[in-house]
Image (cartoon, helix red, strand yellow):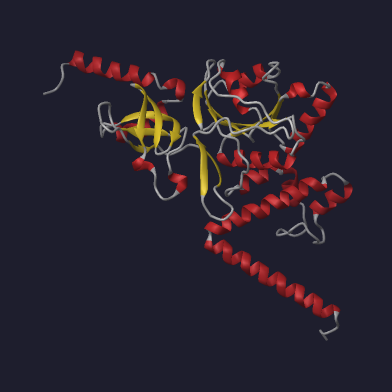
Amino acid sequence: MSLPASREVSSRSTASAALASLVPYGWDAAWQDAFRPYAARGLVPGRVIRVDRGRCDVVTPDGTVRADTAFVVPRDPMKVVCTGDWAALDPEGATPRYVRAYLPRRTAFVRSGSSKRSDGQVLAANIDRAVIAVSLAAELDLARVERFTALAWESGAEPLVALTKADLVPDPAALGHLVADVERAAPGVTVLAVSGCEGTGLDRLAALVASGTTVLLGQSGAGKSTLANSLIGEEAMEVQAVRDMDGKGRHTTTTRNLLTVPGGGTLIDTPGLRGVGLWDAGTGVERVFAEIEEYARKCRFQDCAHHSEPGCAVLAALDTGDLPVRRLESYRKLQRENQRIVAKTDARLRQEIRREWRIKGAEGRAAAEAKRGRIR
């Protein structure tokens, strides 16, 4: 028997009001359309705000619930439910309550899971921007900035670099030089000098992250949790002091947590990352080294490797000083690393690489033979 029209309208109104509670977490019309097949099965939507040991915290129209992830832990680690995912859960009253599926991700920040394996690891899903926290308490590692930025571009999110602990560089000129160095290492990326202690730059950073979902990334001791607390306006994340001897911190944050920002938007804080291996980040590397890609288009040969080929515009820029040696070395390193990780998962590419090695090896042996006068 169908419900009276007034009760049906009331039921729809209640459901819409419940779903409205998800809007601060990023729920929109597109997510609602994508969820319709699951709604037809009686499942409820929610956003994963924390994953921990086979269970996760999910914010739903009924509030935040604890759910089991047994149905979303496949063998492929790239398909494991992650902080930031939009999930389909059992309805209220189910015991235990399971996450049955999650919606296709719009974006995802992925790194290589291990140098010995060909697995990727998703650190955060459905993100709009990635704030890369770099501490000014230690010497700037521009190669690390380039690596993080390449992964951020590849994720589909917009990268932003926050130079934290700016209060440790009191000289404005020196601070300006550091910002300029990072801007050259990450062309097209906004670079902000910020201080959680003094509040420097936080207003501008807050304005930039006031919509969508932002993920905070960086090494331990980079000040991510301090930044998170400053943006949220409360001590949501535990903070510890860094070690005096090397400026490094302990892993205060041990899980990836999604939090709402009072001014709008959501924030995902992540544990400190000791290393971030590339994961099929060819496009991201090209964006980080846009000037090298531009020079490469002017090379005489389309497949120029930029080592010793005649008419190489990249090497010409190196000779004139327009291209710093460090940038080219970093570019080559990331290109090699990315090629290796892609080759691990692409049999055809592995064969091509081996073929190139054989050709280069044969050319090298032929050149050596010619030098010794064995070729007539």
Residue 132 percent across, percent down from the top left: 64, 33
Image quadrant in which the N terminus is located: top left
**Residue 295 image offset from top left, x and y in percent:** 77, 48
Tell me which corner region of the image, top left, top right, bottom left or bottom right, holds residue 40: top left
Q: Is residue 178 left or right of residue 155?
A: right
Q: Is residue 136 above or below residue 119?
A: above
In the picture, measured across the screen, residue 329 lies left or right of residue 14, that is right
The residue most toward the right is 320
Residue farthest along the left direction in this orientation: 1
Would you place residue 277 above or below residue 365 in this image?
A: above
Find residue 134 and report its image quarter.
top right
Looking at the picture, tell me which residue is in the foreground, 327 or 232: 232
Residue 73 locus on image (x, y percent): 39, 44
Left/right of residue 227 with respect to residue 345 in the rendered view:
right
Quick check: 4 left or right of 100? left
Picture quadrant where residue 99 is located: top left
Split into 4 quadrants, where in the image is the C terminus? bottom right
Residue at horizontal 36%, vertical 29%?
Answer: 66
Viewer-nearest residue: 291 or 325: 325
Identify which residue is drawn at 38% across, 28% down.
46
Q: Position of residue 103 (x, y in %)?
A: 40, 37
Tell me what residue is drawn at x 39 percent, y 28 percent.
58
